[in-house]
Amino acid sequence: MMRVAAARGKDVAIVFANAMSGELGAWDLVVGNFGDRNDLDLWYKGGSLIERVAAVNNNTIVVIHSVGPVIMNWVSHPNITGLVYAGAPGEQTGPSIVDVLYGDYNPQGRLPFAVGKSEADYNTNILYNSLPNPTISYTEKLLLDYKYMASAGVTPLFDFGYGLTYGGKFDYSGLSIASTSTGVTVTFKVANLGTQKATEIAQLYLGFPASAGEPPKNLRGFEEVPLAVGASSTVTLKLSALELSVWDTPSQSWKRPTGTFTVYVGSSHSDIRLQGTF
C-alpha cells in the first residue's frame, strides 16, 4: 500500500512490472515459475499494482519488462497515459527508458508478436510439465501468434509490428510490383507528414494463393525509414524465389504455388496502407 500511496497527487507515476523466464533455471522458483513462465500474467501481481496506482494518479506510465506478451487488460484505464514495452534490454534499461520518456530519443521499435486479450487468443497451450518428455502433435501447424489471430478473426490488443513514435505521421503511396528473373521487387514511397523527425518501420506482408494453405498475411520484409518533417523516401524490398515458395512434401522441395499473390504494405500487420497483386 505504501507504493500506491506514494503515487497519489504526483505529476506522474511510473510503474515497472515484469514477467521474465529462465531466471534461475533449476535452482529456484520465481513466484511459482520454474525457469520458463507458467502463464501470461505479470509477476508479483503486477497487473493489480498497475490498476491500484492508476486509481490514484491520472498520469500513470507503465513500463513492461518481459520476454514475450503479457495480459494487459488494465491498459484501457483512463489514467494510464503511456505504455512502454521494454523487453529485456539488460543493464542499460534505465538510461534508455529515461531517454525515451523525456523525448531525447524518438522510439521506433515494433512488436515482434501480437498482444492478445487472453491466453486463448494464441491457439496454443502452455506445457506445465515436461517430464517425462511429452509428445507434441503441432496441430496448430502454421497458425501461430498473429497468423492464427488473423485466420480466426481474433482482434489483438496490439498487433504484430505495432509501435509508436513522437510526432511522426507517415503517408504511403506509389506501390509498384515488378517480376524479375529472381523473384519480385516491391517499391513504394513513405513521407513524414508529422511534426517531428521520426523513423517509420515499413513492413511488407505476402498473401499466397488460396491453394497454398498459408496464413492470410506473412511478414516477408521490413525497412527502417528515417525521415525529417516533410521528407519522403522510396523504399525497395525484394522477394526471392524461396520467399514465394511453400514446402512440397511429396517432392521434398520448395515450390511456387500457382495463382494470384497479394502484396500488403503498411505500418503493422493490421495497419495496411497499400495493396497490390501479381
Image (tube, rainbow, N blue to C red):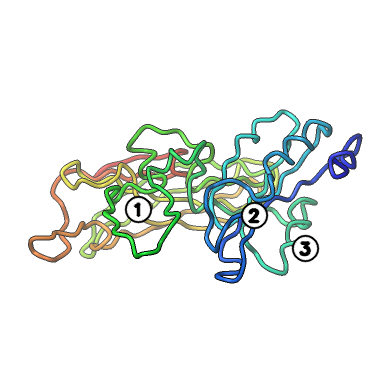
Foreground mark, 3 or 2, reads 2
> Which sits in the foreground, 157 or 236?
157
Q: Considering the numbered disc 3 on the image, is that residue within a helix, a strand or a loop?
A: helix
> Which sits in the foreground, 249 or 272?
249
| C-alpha separation, residue under disc 1 versus residue under disc 2 | 48 Å
Query: Vertical placement of 254 versus 167: above or below?
Result: below
**Sequence order check: which comes first, mark 1 or mark 2?**
2
Q: Position of residue 244 (x, y in %)?
A: 24, 56
**Residue 158 left/right relative to 45:** left
Where residue 31 is drawn, which disc sits there? 2
Q: Which part of the image, by quadrant, shows the N terminus?
A: top right
Q: Read off the residue under disc 3.
A: 95
> Which sits in the foreground, 155 or 25?
25
| C-alpha separation, residue under disc 3 versus residue under disc 2 | 28 Å
Q: Position of residue 45 (x, y in %)?
A: 68, 44
Q: Read off the residue under disc 1.
A: 186
Q: Considering the numbered disc 2 on the image, is that residue within a helix, a strand or a loop?
A: loop
